[in-house]
Image (cartoon, grey):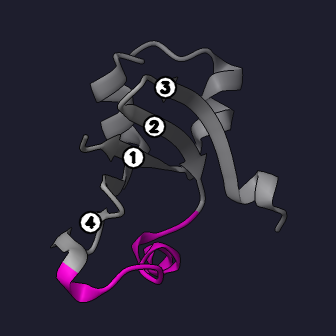
Amino acid sequence: MTTQEYFTPFLIFSSNRWQSVEFLTSITPPDLAMFRVDFSKNEIILDTYTDLIYRKDNYVYVIFLRPVEVMQETNGFLDYKEHDKELIKGKQWLVISRVKLQ
């Protein structure tokens, strides 16, 4: 599996305080371990099976993984065309955000 197959970004947002990238991905909650390596336990705000929020270097990082159906409902994608249905089939919704504190 290539990185492109593993993470397909579909929405990128950036402002002076908030950067966020949303992905369609085939990872599962145990795969979120790849994001749990670069900070100490005292920096963790929330750590659940599908959510990770931590503070580091004047930023708060928010990472969560949800079923694609939650993405569809949240983002209002209710009427997919057939080729779009194939794109999201078997995928998860991964959001990685970084919020500058000051």
The kind of residue tagged 4 is: Tyr
Residue 52 as seen in the image, left or right of residue 67: left
Circles 2 and 4, Cβ within 8 Å, touching? The answer is no
Near-viewer residue (79 or 19) = 19
The magenta region covers 27-42
- Amino acid beneath label 1: Arg
N-terminal label among 2 and 4: 2
Residue at image x 55%, y 66%? 27
Residue 45 picture location, percent across and down: 15, 68
Residue wearing tag 4: 54
Find out whether the residues at labels 2 and 3 contact each other: C-beta distance under 8 Å. Answer: yes
Distance (Cα) linking label 2 and label 1? 6 Å
Kind of residue sitting beneath label 2: Ser
Looking at this view, is 76 or 94 the one in front?
94
Distance between mark 3 and mark 4 Cα atoms: 20 Å
Q: Which SS class for mark 2?
A: strand
Q: What residue does disc 2 label?
A: 20
